[in-house]
Amino acid sequence: MAEDTNSMNICQLLIPQNKERTIYDGFIESLGQEFHLKIELPANRDLTFCRIHCDVNLMNILRGYLQIIKTRLQQCSSIPTFLEELKSIVYLAVKQNKELKALNTAPYLYEKLIQEIAIVKWDKVVEIDESFKKVKLKTVDGAEREHYITVHISSQYPNEIPECSTDLPSEFILLWNNSMTLADVIKQFDKVVERHQIFWNCLDEIDRSTWVLEPENPRRKDNARRIALGNNSSVQIIVNPLHPTHLPECRFLGADKVVKPLRDNMNKSVHLWNTSHSILHNLQALMEITFPSQISSKKEDFCLECSICYLYRLEGEIPDKVCEFPACSKPFHQACLYEWLRSLPTSNQSLTKYGFKNIYGECPYCSQPITARLEDK
C-alpha cells in the first residue's frame, strides 16, 4: 500500500485498475503536456517483465529513449523509483522534441517571410531583426509623407495574428486569417493611412505656417499642437484624427489681458466654423488674428525661460504662467511659482475639487497679486 501511495504522489493521475495493483492507468504530465500511460506488471511484480503502453504522441517522443527506459526498468526495485526515472526521461524527451520543432520551423518561417517580403517589395523594408521576429515596413502617402508599421511575428505565424505597432494617431486594428501575408498587412495599413490624409494636411499646414512650441519635434501620431500667439501667450489645440476639420479642443495659455480677447472672439464666432476650410484658416478667422509665422518672427521670441529657474523646459514642462500686470508679464513654470509662493509667509493655499492646489501671493518681480496651481498627485 505504501508503494501505491508513493506512486500516486509521483504521478497523481496514474491510478491502479485492479485489486492486485498490477495494472496502472492514467496520465503523465511534462512541460505543460499530458500523455496517456498504462503500466502492466506480472503477478510477481517483477519490473524486468513490466509492459508499458502509451499514446502515439508520447511513443514518438520516446522513440530514441526506449533502450534507456528498458535499462532503467531492470535497475529499479520499485514502481515509485521507476516512475521517478520515467518522469525524468519524459521531461528530457519532451524538451528535446520542442527544441527540434523550433529548429525545424525556423527555416520554413524564414523562407516564407522572405517570399512575402519579395511580394511587398524590399524597398518598403526599413528593418528586420536577426530572428525575423520583427519586421518594420514603410509606406509613402500621396503627399510624400513616410509612415511606418512594425510587425511582430511569433513562431506560430501565420496561424497566430501578428502584433502591429504604428505611427498612426488612432488605433490600428489588423483583420487577420491564416491565409494572409505581409502584403495584406501593408494593404490594410495603407487604407488607414489614406483615411488620415486630411488630418496630416491640416497639421502640416500648422507646423509649416506657425511657431509650434510643443511638441518640439511632432510625430505623425501626435494630434496636439501648442501654437505661439505672441509674447508669453499661446493656444493648445487637440485635433480629432477622425474628424480633423471639426473644431478642435482649445486651451488658451498666457496673460489674461492677451488671451481673453482671443477667447471671447472665438466664443462669439464659434458657429462660423467651416469644416470645408483648414483648422488654421478657421482659428485665425474666429480669433480675428494672424498667427506669428516662421517668416516674420523667430521662435526665440516666444520661448522665454522661467523667471525663477531660468530654464525654458523643466521636466518636460514649459513656462505657462504669466504675471497679469502689463508692466511685468514675467513667465513662470507653474511648479516654480508654486514653490516660490509656498515659501512666503503671506501666501494662502486652497485645494479645489478637481485635484489642484491653488496658492495666492505676490509676483516675485512686481509684487502684484498672482496665483499658481499644482496638480495634487
Image: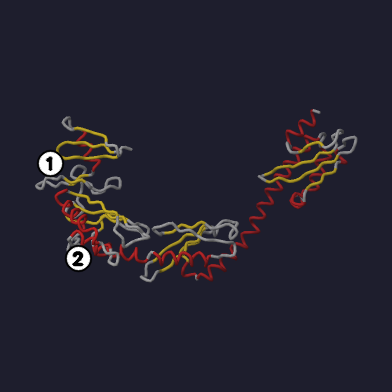
What kind of residue is marked 2?
A: Ile
Location of the C terminus (image quadrant):
top left
Q: Position of residue 82 (x, y in %)?
A: 79, 38
* Whole-number angstrom distance, CA of label 1 to CA of label 2: 33 Å
In front here: 94 or 64?
Answer: 94
Extreme residue toward the right, this view: 43
What kind of residue is marked 1?
A: Tyr
Q: Which mark is residue 365?
A: 1
Taking the image as shown, residue 314 lies to the left or right of residue 347, namely right
Residue pictured at 30% horizontal, 45% vertical:
315
Residue pictured at 67% horizontal, 48% vertical:
95
Q: Which mark is residue 64?
A: none
- Give the structural element (helix, strand or loop) at label 1: loop
In front here: 250 or 227?
Answer: 250
At label 2, counting other C-alpha atoms closer than 10 Å, the crowd grade (few under 14, some 14-19, many 20 or more) is few
In front here: 330 or 191?
Answer: 191
Q: Quadrant of residue 243?
A: bottom left
Q: Position of residue 272 (x, y in %)?
A: 23, 62
- Give the structural element (helix, strand or loop) at label 2: loop
Residue hosting label 2:
295
Taking the image as shown, residue 287 lies to the left or right of residue 377, namely left
Extreme residue toward the top, this view: 2
Q: Quadrant of residue 371?
A: top left
